């Protein structure tokens, strides 16, 4: 099931979601228009590398690069898939949380994704880039705030409208299997930050649940009387 669009978008403009999409596209364009040597040098200076956590190499500290790496992508398919998921699921989540909380959720889920990848593969020297872990947190938040609202998905050869929880659970199963396979096969594990995806998802689940509780407890302002 491939998500295609949000059939019932919110009435609020998702400024943070659009801004993240734009930054990712601009960063990718800047990266791919450099010469090959500059591409590699710039990517490695901005990417998160688990093996460098204890060495503090590069211009940015390793944990600072856990944030910068969220806006970098290695290929057009990598960029397209991530931006598609963020565009489809980000709208309703940002509307529910508000811009500031949504930005916090995105960055926090991405950061904990890097922590998860480092905790499971601390010796990995392959640069980790991509917004997948942060977007996984957005998917988790959609489960918290609007799990039954429909999403248009490509299901085999036709477009269906399914409750949001169905493609999200399907995504989670794929990630869980991929993570298990990566631990069983080191060669496969080097190609994708599978543990980061799951860590970002669970972080997003906890953070969005806590935010939902805070929003529910927030006092509602009484209606103001109109002066004549």
Image (spheres, rainbow, N blue to C red):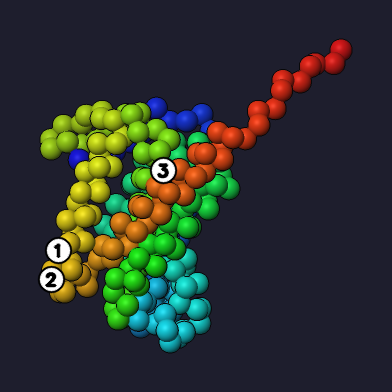
Q: Residue 144's image quarter?
A: top left
Q: Residue 208 in the image: x percent, y percent?
A: 46, 45
**Residue at disc 1, secondary structure:** helix
Q: How many angstroms separate mark 2 from mark 3 (CA)?
A: 31 Å
Q: How many angstroms separate mark 1 from mark 2 (CA)?
A: 6 Å
The residue identified by callout 2 is 185
Residue that appears at 37% across and 56% down: 200
Q: Earlier in the sequence, mark 1 or mark 3?
A: 3
Residue that appears at 36% across and 45% down: 139
Q: Tag on residue 110?
A: none
Q: Residue 168 in the image: x percent, y percent?
A: 28, 42
Q: Residue 195's image quarter?
A: bottom left
The residue identified by callout 1 is 181
**Residue at disc 2, secondary structure:** loop
Between 49 and 2, the residue placed more toward the observer is 49
The residue identified by callout 3 is 141
Q: Earlier in the sequence, mark 2 or mark 3?
A: 3
Q: Residue furthest top?
A: 228
**Residue at disc 3, secondary structure:** helix
Q: How many angstroms separate mark 1 from mark 3 (CA)?
A: 26 Å
Between 67 and 206, the residue placed more toward the observer is 206
Q: Residue 186 in the image: x percent, y percent?
A: 16, 74
Q: Are marks 1 and 2 in contact (CB under 8 Å)?
A: yes
Q: How many marks?
A: 3
Which corner quadrant holds the C terminus?
top right
Q: Residue 2 in the image: x percent, y percent?
A: 23, 42
Residue that appears at 50% across and 72% down: 64
């Amino acid at each position: 099931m491939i998500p295609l669009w949000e059939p019932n978008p919110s009435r609020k403009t998702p400024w943070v979601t659009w801004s993240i999409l734009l930054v990712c596209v601009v960063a990718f364009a800047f990266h791919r228009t450099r010469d090959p040597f500059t591409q590699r040098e710039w990517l490695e200076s901005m990417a998160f590398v688990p093996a460098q956590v204890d060495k503090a190499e590069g211009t940015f500290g390793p944990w600072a690069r856990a944030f910068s790496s969220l806006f970098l992508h290695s290929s057009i398919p990598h960029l397209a898939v991530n931006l598609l998921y963020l565009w489809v699921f980000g709208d309703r989540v940002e509307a529910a949380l508000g811009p500031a909380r949504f930005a916090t959720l995105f960055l926090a889920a991405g950061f904990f994704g890097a922590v998860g990848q480092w905790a499971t593969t601390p010796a990995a020297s392959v640069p980790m880039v991509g917004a997948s872990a942060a977007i996984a947190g957005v998917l988790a938040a959609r489960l918290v705030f609007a799990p039954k609202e429909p999403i248009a998905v490509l299901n085999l050869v036709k477009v269906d409208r399914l409750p949001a929880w169905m493609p999200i659970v399907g995504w989670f199963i794929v990630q869980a299997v991929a993570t298990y396979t990566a631990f069983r096969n080191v060669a496969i594990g080097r190609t994708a930050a599978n543990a980061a995806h799951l860590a970002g998802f669970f972080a997003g689940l906890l953070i969005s649940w806590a935010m939902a509780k805070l929003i529910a407890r927030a006092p509602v302002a009484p209606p103001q009387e109109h002066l004549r």
